[in-house]
Image (cartoon, rainbow, N blue to C red):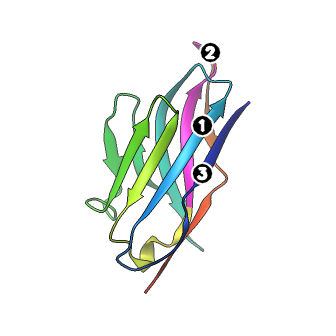
Amino acid sequence: QVQLVESGGGLVQAGGSLRLSCAVSGSIFRIDDMGWYRQAPGKQRELVAGITSGGSTNYADSVKGRFTISIDNTKNTVFLQMNILKPEDTAVYYCNADVFRSTWYRQTYWGQGTQVTVSS
């Protein structure tokens, strides 16, 4: 089995910062792409930021210049540094990883989600 465990969510005032972490553990051959998604009440889940195994990144337009995704390959952990937070960033944030459990068996896994609330 593979587990994704997120941490770092919480309540912060507008303009503040938070750092989310997501540790991947279990039966892993290698990890491919990873990403952070978020879902606000009444809205669809959306991609916030993604990072490939080669280190290429992409961001939603709404977070460009404020959020940074990074990865520690030695610890199978992906981070999301969130700065200049806005009330509209309030959502449940989910970690996502494409994991090879063998040379050919690839599956996408999700974390349980962590709440981020930004007060105005």
Q: Which residues are magenta?
A: 93-104
Residue 42 screen position, x and y as percent: 59, 74
Residue that numbered label 3 is attached to: 6
Q: The residue under label 2 is which amino acid type? A: Ser
Q: Is residue 44 visible?
A: no
* Mark positioned earlier in the residue sequence (2 or 3): 3
Horizontally, residue 118 falls left or right of residue 105, namely left
The answer to if 62 sits in the magenta stretch is no
Q: Residue at x 47, y 42 (%)?
A: 78
Q: Residue at x 39, y 80 (%)?
A: 14
Q: The residue under label 1 is which amino acid type? A: Val
* Mark positioned earlier in the residue sequence (1 or 2): 1
Residue that numbered label 1 is attached to: 24
Task: Provide the major secondary structure of the magenta segment.
Answer: strand
Question: Contact, CB < 8 Å: mark 3 with mark 1?
Answer: no
Horizontally, residue 75 falls left or right of residue 111, namely left
Residue 93 screen position, x and y as percent: 55, 59
* Mark positioned earlier in the residue sequence (3 or 1): 3
Question: Contact, CB < 8 Å: mark 2 with mark 3?
Answer: no
- Point out which mark residue 102 bears: 2
State which quarter of the image contains the N terminus: top right
Label 1: state its secondary structure.
strand
Q: Residue at x 60, y 61 (%)?
A: 114
Horizontally, residue 76 falls left or right of residue 107, namely left
